[in-house]
Image (tube, helix red, strand yellow):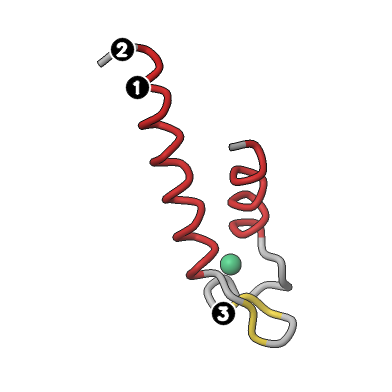
Amino acid sequence: MNWNTSVEVSMDALRTTATAVLDRHAHDGLECVVCGTLWPCEQALLAERNLAVL
Ligand SMILES: [Zn+2]
């Protein structure tokens, strides 16, 4: 595995994880259904930020 392939695999894993987090952390009204905190919750914000830099 060369350097480029390794980076691409890592990016793919990060993208998959971030997408899964965003799938789970949905909002019901004003709150996240997983965290129970005001939407957008920390997890969703983090995942969105990760997706934005990919
Ligand atoms: Zn959440």
Q: Residue at x 60, y 43 (%)?
A: 50
Query: What amino acid does circle 2 point to?
Result: Asn
How would you rate the neighbour count of disc 1 (Cα within 10 Å): few for under 14, some for 14-19, many for 20 or more?
A: few
The tag earlier along the polypeptide, 2 or 3, is: 2
Quarter holding ligand 1: bottom right
Q: Residue furthest bottom?
A: 29
Q: Measured from the top left, where is residue 7 in percent x and y? A: 42, 23
Note whether 2 is above or below 24 in the view shown.
Answer: above
- Left or right for 41, reference 8: right
**Camera-side mark, 3 or 1:** 1
Along the line of sight, which residue is nearer the eye, 24 or 13?
13
Q: Are marks 3 and 1 in contact (CB under 8 Å)?
A: no
Report the residue marked by disc 1: 5
Query: What amino acid does circle 3 point to?
Result: Val
Q: Residue at x 50, y 68 (%)?
A: 23
How would you rate the neighbour count of disc 2 (Cα within 10 Å): few for under 14, some for 14-19, many for 20 or more?
A: few
